Image: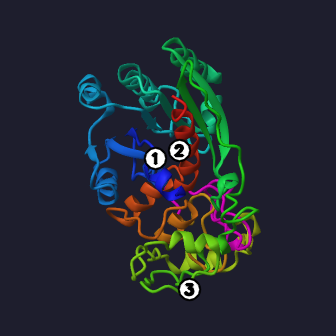
Amino acid sequence: CMGSNRSKLKKYNVVDLFCGAGGFSLGLKDTNRFNSILANDIDMDMCEAYSLNFPESKILSKSISDLDFFSIKEKNNIDVVVGGPPCQAYSLSGKRLKNDPRANLFLEYFKAIKVTRPNIFVYENVKGLFSYKKGIIFYQIREIFEKIGYDLSINLVNALNYGVPQSRERVFIIGYKKGLEYSFPSYSHSTKISKKPITISDAISDLPMIKSNENSVKYLSKPKTSYQRLMRKNAPENLMDHKSSKHGESLINIMRYLPEGGLKEDLPYKIRPKSGYANSYGRLWWDKPSTTITRNFGTPSSARCVHPKIDRALTTREGARLQSFPDHYKFYGSRAKRNLQIGNAVPPLLAKKIGKSIAKSLDKL
């Protein structure tokens, strides 16, 4: 009876802008409450990855400024729009370019909302959005959306608190038409998986411990944790994307001296790299969650991404696991492109929880 009632619940149409490889769309799909009717990204490889996983959805690989939202609105009933314009201009970890045109892409996103008039929209970005240009951009965002009839739920969210094995802070602004009720999901460590934060060991200990420049298509063991069982649901027999980067001997030697959780300051002075960020050449912890997965998680000189136990950077599949992409999910292009698709994504498990809260709000209409 419960299953029958669930199957009769209305499904809502979603447009996913700046969709990337589809992390947010996957989370929404997994609620069984949404149909992805259109997705858009300017990056062709991102669109290829999206198409591999959502063959039933229309995908447009072009700039958002070239989309005809009036025509899209005429042809479709749009309930929800989600999107996260490129965040590099806001990011606290990179150079914040005052005149970076990407910082104005939110205006194109705003135009899309103004034309399509969804009942709810989701605007996702990095924590640095709050302080970029002394907060002017953030206040402008809030003002223009309120002027066109939306109340806003503004949330600084750590994915770690929603069942993702990674500390990842992002801003989620949920806009909902005046008269609607909406509550952002209260955080929990996903009670079906764990009552405490999920660790790297919880997430990837069933994957083979391959060394630098190795590949494996066989799992190390059966799933050891609830999280691993979730990630391996509907997985193909052969493990995908578990191939490690080829590191030079000098780099491998540097990593040999890195203790678990160590940074380059922990290295002997003679081999300590002189360049990089404070968290460059950093090793992760086996029994702690991951730090933020970035697009360069296959490069040890980037932000902390050295495997807790092995002298190499994370593989594409390990990065996907830490972002909560299931093992059946496909990425496209070179290793660097696949890692970009993963590092830029909204973790699907977090998106699923947000999706449930959106469906709950729309059900009251």
Please give the range of residues in magenta: 270-297
Q: Position of residue 152 (x, y in %)?
A: 60, 24
Whole-number angstrom distance, CA of label 2 to CA of label 3: 30 Å
| 329 within the magenta span | no
Callout 3: 10 Å neighbours few (<14), some, many (20+)?
few
Callout 2: 10 Å neighbours few (<14), some, many (20+)?
many
Q: Does residue 136 appear left or right of residue 59 in this picture?
A: right
For the point 52% across and 27% down, the residue is 98
Say whether disc 1 or disc 3 marks the residue closer to the N-terminus: 1
**Which amino acid is tagged 3?**
Lys
Q: Nearer the viewer, residue 282 or 220?
A: 220
Q: Which residue is mark 1?
A: 33
**Which amino acid is tagged 2?**
Gly
Q: Secondary structure at mark 1?
A: loop
For the point 28% across and 49% down, the residue is 44
Q: Which residue is mark 3?
A: 222
